[in-house]
Amino acid sequence: MSRALSILACLTLIGAFSGCDVLGQPLMEEPQPSCVFDLKSLGYPARPSREYVEAFGLHPSTLAFADAEHLVLTFVSLESGNPSDRFIKHYSIKCRLHLVVLDARTGNVLTSRDWPTPDNGDQVVAAFDGTFVLRSGNHLTLYSTSLDKLKELDAARSLEPHEYLSEIFASPTGRHILLEISLRNEYHFTWMETGNLQTGPLFSDKFFPSSISDEEMVGSGIDSSDNGGLFVRKPGELGHAIPSSSHGMRDWIFLNENIIAIQDGYSSVQLIRKDGSVIEKIRPPSHDWFS
């Protein structure tokens, strides 16, 4: 046994020095990140408090590239001094929105800002050409990477009583946004150009969007005649169904105008064309999470 262990140890050392494993196969080098961000040093709550988890779940955070050199990070934390009542109510939580612009090459903080917010859903929603759009409730603001305000839109001014901005979808280029407006069980949508925050006319649709490109939406129909199928369509058009029997109902995300990713957390990600044909399947190493 000792002789066998000695031989195995020798083979391991030989493999290590020669760049091969004990079977003589080339060793696969671990991919190295270009930089590592220490979120705790930025004030990110690594362990959410019990009060926050009971009210909201995990702390929401969002990353977006404004351009090749600037990475925008937003996250929400609890204001200090919040009550610790185990049965704390949603409306008594006081949140704080943190906005950080990082050098994407080094991870250095270039500028940051934080302020109180009543909504834990506040976040960066789109970014392009050195600018980004920040959502704060029903308010949208276009910023530069130096945090200069370029445009503002108060969506609440165009909403009817009891309507609210329920969700925002951004295209992969960041140049277009789809606003989803909810009123009880009804949904309305409007298309927006990110660069000027100009909205188009409202349209109603029996459709649950999952993602958008610069011209189209992908999502599921909610009409009984749709049988819950998946569709790619433009506003005001019927579009076409995507064969989904082999893909299942998961998150569908436009990567560009022609390719859609089917994402399901730890599972493999499928890249498909708009006709449903599979291009590639990607499986993350270990337990990495796709985002």
Image: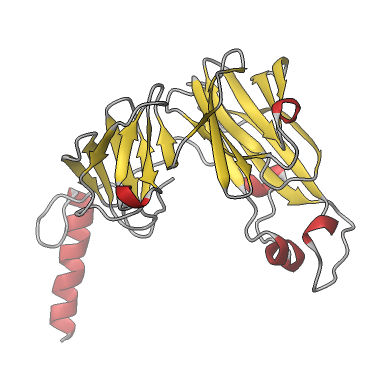
Residue 163 at what x, y percent from top left?
A: 69, 40
Quarter in which the C terminus is drawn:
top left
Q: Position of residue 152 (x, y in %)?
A: 72, 19
61 or 12: nearer the eye?
Answer: 61
Considering only vertical position in the picture, is 84 above or below 279? below
Q: Position of residue 268 (x, y in %)?
A: 28, 53
Instruction: State the image coordinates of residue 128 (x, y, percent, origin top left).
Output: 51, 19
Whether residue 37 can be seen here = no
Q: Quadrant of the N terminus?
A: bottom left
In depth, the one of 226 and 287 nearer the eye is: 226
Query: Is residue 247 depicted above or below 276 in this figure?
Result: below
The answer to whether residue 34 is above or below residue 251 is above
Q: How many marks?
A: 0
Q: In the rendered image, is residue 78 in sight?
A: yes
Residue at image point 88% right, 64% down: 83
What residue lies at 34% left-to-right and 31% top-to-bottom? 233
